[in-house]
Image (cartoon, rainbow, N blue to C red):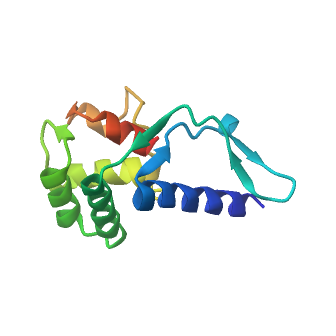
């Protein structure tokens, strides 16, 4: 079923990004086919990214801190190893940004629409610098 497809996709991207450091960076529905035998086929490898080891280790530390809901460690990781900048980089704001971008669990932060220009919490604490690498990883 679909749970198996999503589980396979999650594992594929985890291995591509975290183990190999080279990943497909255009994962929209038109770039996937579930084969008759149930295997997932990933199409259109024209857009890929390379993630250096330091960046991959940063993502791993960030995910571990997020799973533990250790907000000070999340904020510290972003401050020390990310190029993302906020107007007011409080612990709470940095943690909220990470959960809004990366967390796929059904939480209130998962409902934050980063593109809602009328209601985004980041209207009051703007992102002043982001990275292209971050965009492709989040995507």
Q: Is residue 90 above or below residue 45?
A: below
Q: Position of residue 137 (x, y in %)?
A: 41, 45
Specify the quadrant that holds the N terminus: bottom right
Q: Nearer the viewer, residue 16 or 34?
A: 16
Q: Quadrant of residue 28?
A: top right
Q: Which residue is pictured at 32% across the width and 33% down the height? A: 132
Q: In this image, 64 relative to 90: left or right?
A: right
The furthest residue to the bottom:
68
Q: Nearer the viewer, residue 31 or 85?
A: 31
Q: Is residue 105 visible?
A: no
The furthest residue to the right:
36
Q: Position of residue 19 (x, y in %)?
A: 43, 62
Q: Which residue is pictured at 38% across the width and 48% down the height? A: 100
Q: Quadrant of residue 123?
A: top left
Q: Is residue 4 visible?
A: yes
Q: Position of residue 90 (x, y in %)?
A: 14, 50
Q: In this image, 10 relative to 80: left or right?
A: right
Q: Position of residue 30 (x, y in %)?
A: 69, 35
Could you tell me how many numbered marks the image carries?
0
Q: Nearer the viewer, residue 47 or 9?
A: 47
Q: Which residue is pictured at 54% across the width and 36% down the height? A: 26
Q: Which residue is pictured at 64% across the width and 61% down the height? A: 8
């Amino acid at each position: 079923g679909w749970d198996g497809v999503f589980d396979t996709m999650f594992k594929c991207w985890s291995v591509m990004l975290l183990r190999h450091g080279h990943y497909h960076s255009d994962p929209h529905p038109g770039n996937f086919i579930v084969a008759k035998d149930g295997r997932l086929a990933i199409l259109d490898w024209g857009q890929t990214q390379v993630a250096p080891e330091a960046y991959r280790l940063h993502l791993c530390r960030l995910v571990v801190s997020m799973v533990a809901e250790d907000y000070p460690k999340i904020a510290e990781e972003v401050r020390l190893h990310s190029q993302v900048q906020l107007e007011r980089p409080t612990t709470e704001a940095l943690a909220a940004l990470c959960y809004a971008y990366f967390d796929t669990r059904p939480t209130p932060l998962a409902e934050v629409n980063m593109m809602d220009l009328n209601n985004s919490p980041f209207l009051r604490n703007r992102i002043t610098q982001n990275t292209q690498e971050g965009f492709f990883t989040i995507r």
